[in-house]
Image: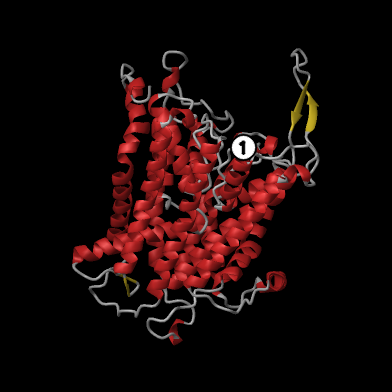
């Protein structure tokens, strides 16, 4: 437990100054970092044909976001299809099938990194280190840019003082925000972390796979092939950018990708570092420290509850080994060098954010810990992904403001700007969207056993399918492995869920922010709703829990809750749920 407290405390202490730095980067004011980064940024602006001083309203900002994703997605899809004909392929890896290439391209384009392939066996060095790693830098930067634009909109946009009422507002320049995110934030952090991981033994080379003799000379196979590559660089940005995935199929459970206790601590901190820093950044950009502290308290409370439940669950024996082995903590699917506590912490953090990397197999978690991972993805705002997580959190804040306004008999408003019919309609769509996507595709898949591909019957089989679509919609990428997901149905259905789960939850809040920016600011009075109080914080947490409880409780009963009850009552007939 001491290690958990140390990791969480370190992440928070690092996030505070980093959030302040991020706010300065996106303020547009002169900054000490200009001397180092501005020449490179100006070069990129010229190469891309960008006018950095030109502002955008929410429509142009959103159009630029969607257009850049379309161009990048087509380019990546083509490169994955042709990887066998391109350089940096010393191991002679062949092409991906078209449906797997499409799923992989969309998965990494949406910052999900859901993998239906095994990285070291099916992707060339070019695909891994150029295609995949490039997306791991660019896609979190895109979401962070949307988050920054939403925050500007909540304050009336840039140059708010000279703007006319009900006029479109300047939310910044999308391309400038993305370039600054990559150049001034992600690249320096990833370079530093890659050096730290290399010092711990994570491979960092372009040499081909190594053939080594086995230590045990008595076995029939005398040689083993160990895939190498620039692993440290990919692991650094996959963790920092809440990208997830991994160079190796087993991900950070592989000793080459995560070899030591120190590397495990570094990678765990990196999962939540930028999402935590974004909360502090929001406080500085909105000039409302109290709101940032309230947000930190709400997320921290939910996170602590989930961590506690997950650690408690994994300290219990695995029901599958009842009366077959000595009672003890659940070590199935875990690395002995990490144990149940650090594995449970990683599983909780990686699903509270949109990271999805693993250092233990989630399919082997006890039911309660498995439920915690699903809760983190369904809420999708307990820290959340880089940028997109805080945007999702703001959606819950807007809904809570609306409900609180109704309860006290006032027109709902946030920072003096009224939340009216247009905003509530868009918020309603965002509430219904995950339920439709996840439950509909889960029902269709379970109704056709030929396409399901799950490896377990009963409650756990339902959980495997539900988890996969939840992971896709939440842009998380982790999975209850054991699922046969590299099929045309799984690849293509997940593509649909990936797209819906990425773009609507970012574009619709941008529309809401653009609408709020145009509104006249009402003066603050004694009757105005304060967002920096414990009462509002607890109300917000309650709204988050109630909305997700009402949406997904039946599916949860058929999954981890049913499994937990079945394990507690061994006589329960599980096969009646799924023959």
Q: Quadrant of the C terminus?
A: top left
Vertical arrangement, residue 197 with respect to residue 280, above or below: above
Vertical arrangement, residue 78 with respect to residue 89, above or below: below
Helix, strand, or loop for circle 1?
Answer: loop
Which quarter of the picture shows residue 562? top left
Direction from residue 530 to residue 355 in the image, left or right: right
| Residue that appears at 57% across and 76% down | 28
The residue singled out by tag 1 in the image is 117
Query: In this figure, what is the number of numbered marks?
Result: 1
Quick check: can you spot residue 17?
no
Residue 490 x/y as whole percent: 51, 38
Quick check: can you spot residue 543?
yes
Q: Residues within 10 Å of mark 1 (few under 14, many from 20)?
A: some
The image's colouring method is secondary structure
* Nearer to me, 342 or 143: 143
| Residue that appears at 30% across and 64% down | 401
| Residue that appears at 71% across and 48% down | 129
| Residue that appears at 56% across and 69% down | 174
Residue 148 x/y as whole percent: 50, 67
* Nearer to me, 232 or 64: 64
Direction from residue 240 to residue 283 in the image, left or right: left
* Nearer to me, 339 or 541: 541
Residue 309 x/y as whole percent: 39, 37
Residue 74 x/y as whole percent: 63, 55
């Amino acid at each position: 437990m001491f290690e958990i407290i140390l990791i969480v405390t370190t992440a928070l202490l690092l996030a505070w100054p980093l959030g302040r730095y991020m706010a300065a980067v996106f303020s547009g004011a002169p900054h000490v970092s200009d001397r180092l980064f501005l020449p490179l940024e100006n070069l990129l602006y010229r190469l891309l044909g960008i006018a950095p001083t030109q502002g955008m309203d929410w429509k142009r900002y959103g159009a630029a976001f969607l257009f850049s994703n379309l161009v990048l997605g087509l380019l990546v899809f083509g490169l994955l299809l042709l990887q066998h004909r391109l350089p940096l392929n010393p191991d002679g890896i062949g092409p991906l099938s078209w449906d797997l290439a499409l799923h992989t391209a969309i998965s990494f384009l949406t910052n999900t990194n859901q993998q239906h392939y095994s990285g070291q066996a099916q992707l060339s060095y070019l695909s891994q280190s150029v295609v995949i790693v490039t997306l791991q830098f660019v896609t979190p930067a895109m979401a962070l840019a949307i988050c920054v634009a939403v925050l500007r909109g909540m304050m009336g946009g840039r140059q708010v003082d000279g703007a006319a009422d009900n006029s479109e507002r300047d939310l910044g320049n999308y391309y400038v925000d993305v370039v600054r995110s990559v150049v001034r934030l992600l690249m320096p952090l990833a370079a530093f972390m890659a050096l730290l991981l290399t010092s711990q033994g994570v491979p960092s080379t372009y040499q081909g796979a190594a053939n080594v003799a086995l230590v045990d000379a008595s076995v029939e196979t005398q040689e083993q092939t160990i895939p190498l590559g620039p692993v440290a660089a990919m692991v650094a940005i996959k963790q920092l950018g809440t990208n997830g995935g991994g160079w190796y199929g087993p991900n950070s459970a592989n000793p080459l990708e995560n070899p030591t206790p120190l590397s495990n601590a570094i990678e765990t901190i990196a999962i939540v570092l930028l999402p935590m820093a974004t909360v502090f950044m929001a406080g500085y950009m909105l000039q409302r420290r109290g709101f940032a502290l309230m947000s930190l308290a709400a997320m921290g409370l939910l996170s602590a509850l989930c961590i506690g439940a997950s650690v408690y669950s994994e300290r219990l024996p695995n029901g599958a080994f009842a009366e077959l082995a000595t009672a003890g903590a659940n070590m199935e699917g875990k690395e002995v060098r990490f144990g149940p506590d650090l594995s449970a912490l990683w599983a909780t953090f990686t699903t509270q954010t949109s990271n999805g990397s693993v250092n233990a197999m989630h399919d082997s978690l006890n039911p309660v810990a498995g439920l915690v991972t699903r809760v983190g993805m369904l809420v999708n705002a307990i820290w959340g992904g880089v940028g997109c997580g805080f945007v999702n959190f703001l959606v819950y804040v807007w809904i809570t403001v609306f409900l609180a306004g109704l309860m006290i008999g006032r027109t709902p408003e946030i920072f003096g700007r009224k939340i009216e019919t247009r905003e509530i309609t868009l918020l309603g769509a965002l509430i219904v969207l995950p339920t439709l996507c996840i439950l509909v595709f889960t029902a269709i898949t379970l109704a056709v056993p030929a396409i399901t591909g799950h490896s377990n019957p009963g409650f756990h089989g339902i959980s495997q399918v539900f988890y996969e679509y939840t992971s896709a919609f939440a842009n998380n990428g982790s999975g209850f492995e054991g699922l046969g997901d590299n099929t045309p149905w799984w690849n293509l259905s997940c593509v649909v869920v990936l797209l819906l789960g990425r773009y609507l939850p970012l574009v619709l809040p941008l529309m809401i922010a653009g609408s709020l920016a145009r509104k006249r600011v009402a003066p603050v009075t004694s009757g105005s709703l304060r967002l920096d109080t414990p009462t509002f914080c607890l109300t917000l947490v309650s709204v988050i829990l109630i909305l997700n409880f009402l949406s997904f409780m039946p599916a949860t009963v058929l999954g981890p809750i049913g499994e937990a009850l079945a394990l507690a009552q061994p006589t329960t007939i599980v096969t009646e749920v799924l023959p």
